[in-house]
Amino acid sequence: MFYRNPYIPLQGGSVSAVVRAARSEDAASIAAIYNHAVLNTTATFDTEVKSAENRAAWLTDRSKQHPVIVAEKDGVVVGWGAFLPYSDRCSYISTVEMSVYIDPAHVRSGLGGMLSRQLLDMAPGIGVHNILSRICSENVASLAMAERLGFTTVGTLHEVGRKFDRWLDVVMLEFITEPSQTV
C-alpha cells in the first residue's frame, strides 16, 4: 500500500465498468456530466456550463500530473475524475485537487469510489504527494466516501460560496501519499 492512510474498500454498490484515460471523443460526455452538476447540485460551485469544445480543449491541456480518467459502461462514459492543479506556484507542483463527477443515472453505484481509488493509486507514480478535495458540507455522501478512502478533514471554510441563493460551506480534505513514492 502506498498510502499513509490506506483506503477501506467501499461497502455496497455493484459496479462493472472500465476505467481508462479520457480521450478527446469523451469531451461531450464529460461536459454533459459536469453540466448536470453545475445546473442541479452543489458538487461544484461553478455556475457556467461548459461546451464539448471547451472540454476538448481542456483535455488536450493536461500534464502528466493532471490526468483525466473516465468510467465507461457498455461503451458509454458514465463518470470521470481528474487531478487539477492546486496552484500555479512552483512549490505546489506535487499538490493537486481531485474532482470526480458521475452521471446522475449512476450515482451511488460505486463508480465514484472506483474512479477515486484509481486516481489515488496513480498519484505516487506521477509525482503527486498531497491530494486535496473541497466538498460542500451538505454533500454528505461525498464526505463519507472521502473518509472511507482515507482522506483527512483539515478544516471547514464557512460561507465561501453562494449558489442557489444560499451561502455554502466547504470542507477541506487531504490525502498524503508516502513521501518516498513521490518525486
Image (spheres, helix red, strand yellow):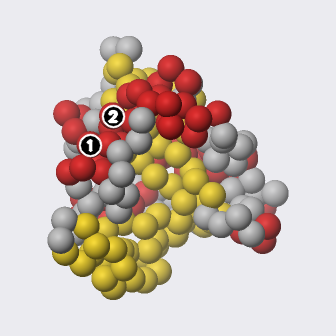
What residue is pinned by disc 2? 32
Quarter of the image holding residue 95? Answer: bottom right
Q: Which residue is depicted at the point 57% across and 50% down?
A: 83
How many labels sit on residues? 2
The image shows residue 32 at horizontal and vertical percentages of 33, 34
Quadrant (top left/top right/bottom left/bottom right) for the C terminus:
bottom right
Contact, mark 1 vs mark 2 (Cβ under 8 Å): yes
160 to 93, vertically: above or below: below
Q: Is residue 171 left or right of residue 138?
A: right
Residue located beneath label 1 in the image: 36
Is 92 positioned to the left or the right of 69 in the image?
A: right
Residue drawn where x is 64% and y is 33% of the image: 60
Closer-to-camera residue (94/37): 37
Give the answer, above or below, for where 148 lies relative to 13: below
Q: At numbered mark 2, what does the secondary structure look like: helix, strand or loop?
A: helix
Disc 1 on helix, strand or loop? helix
Give the crowd class for mark 1: few <14, some 14-19, many >=20 residues within 10 Å. Answer: some
Q: Residue at x 28, y 48 (%)?
A: 37
Q: Amino acid at mark 2?
A: Ala
Between the C-alphas of marks 1 and 2, the distance is: 6 Å
Q: Is residue 76 above or below residue 143?
A: above
Q: Which residue is drawn at the image coordinates 72% and 42% (left, top)?
A: 64
Question: Please, is residue 4 above or below residue 20 in the view?
Answer: below
Determine which of the numbered discs, if any, sits on residue 136 in the image: none
Residue 156, percent from left and from top = 38, 82
Residue 4 location in percent, x, y?
59, 66
Q: Which percent across, then down, holds residue 67?
A: 61, 41
Identified by mark 1, the residue type is His
